[in-house]
C-alpha cells in the first residue's frame, strides 16, 4: 500500500523568456523560450541566475510545482526566484 508521498512528485523548473515585438499595434512583451527541470530548488535557481545574464534572455523564473500522479493535476507555481522581465503571475 502506498502512502500519500508516493502519489505526488515535486518538479523544480527553470523557465527563460525572450522579448517579443508587438505586432499590428500590440504591445511588446515576453514569451517562454526554454524550460529546464532539475532535481533541487538550488539547481533551478542557479540556472535562472546564470540564464538571466545572457544577452538574449529577457528574464528567468525558477519555481516549484507539485504534480498529483493520480490525477495528473499540478499545483500553482511556488516561485523560488524571478529575475528580469518576466510575465505577471496572472499570465503564468
Image (spheres, rainbow, N blue to C red):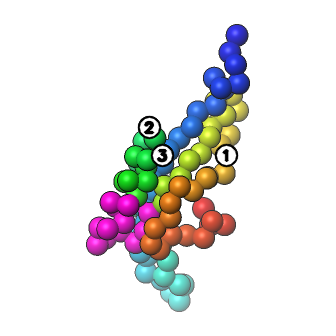
Q: Is the residue marked by circle 1 packed among few (<14), some (14-19), or many (20+) residues within 10 Å?
A: few
Q: Name the image quarter holding residue 20.
A: bottom left
Q: Which mark is residue 75?
A: 1
Which residue appears at 46% of the width and 41% of the height?
40
Residue found 44% across the figure and 37% down from its top: 39
Marks 1 and 2 sit apart, C-alpha to C-alpha, by 17 Å
Q: Quadrant of the N terminus?
A: top right
Q: Nearer the viewer, residue 26 or 55?
A: 55
Task: Name the mark nearer the viewer: 1 or 2.
Answer: 2
Q: Which residue is mark 3?
A: 41
Q: Is disc 2 placed on a helix, strand or loop?
A: loop
Q: Is residue 87 above or below residue 33?
A: below
11 versus 56 height, above or below? above
- Under circle 1, the secondary element is loop
**Residue 78 at x, y = what percent?**
61, 53
- Name the N-terminal-most of marks 1 and 2: 2
Q: Is residue 7 left or right of residue 22?
A: right
Q: How many marks?
A: 3
Residue found at the far front of this picture: 42
Residue drawn at x 54%, y 84% as measured from the top left:
26
Residue extending farthest bottom: 25
The residue labelled by disc 2 is 39
Q: Could you give the CA–CA distance between mark 2 and mark 3, rounded to whole angstroms?
A: 7 Å
- Which residue is located at x 53 percent, y 89 percent? 25
- Between 34 and 51, the residue placed more toward the observer is 51
Marking on residue 49: none
Q: Is residue 51 magenta?
A: yes
Q: Is residue 90 magenta?
A: no
Which span is picked out in magenta?
A: 49-60
Q: Of the two numbered discs 1 and 3 on the same chain, state the one appearing first in sequence.
A: 3
Circle 3: element type: helix
Amino acid at each position: 500500500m502506498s502512502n500519500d508521498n508516493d502519489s505526488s512528485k515535486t518538479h523544480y523548473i527553470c523557465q527563460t523568456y525572450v522579448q517579443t515585438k508587438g505586432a499590428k499595434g500590440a504591445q511588446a512583451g515576453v514569451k517562454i523560450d526554454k524550460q529546464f527541470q532539475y532535481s533541487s530548488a538550488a539547481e533551478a535557481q542557479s540556472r535562472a541566475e546564470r540564464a538571466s545574464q545572457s544577452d538574449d534572455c529577457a528574464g528567468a523564473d525558477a519555481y516549484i510545482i507539485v504534480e498529483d500522479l493520480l490525477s495528473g493535476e499540478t499545483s500553482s507555481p511556488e516561485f523560488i526566484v524571478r529575475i528580469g522581465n518576466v510575465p505577471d503571475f496572472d499570465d503564468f
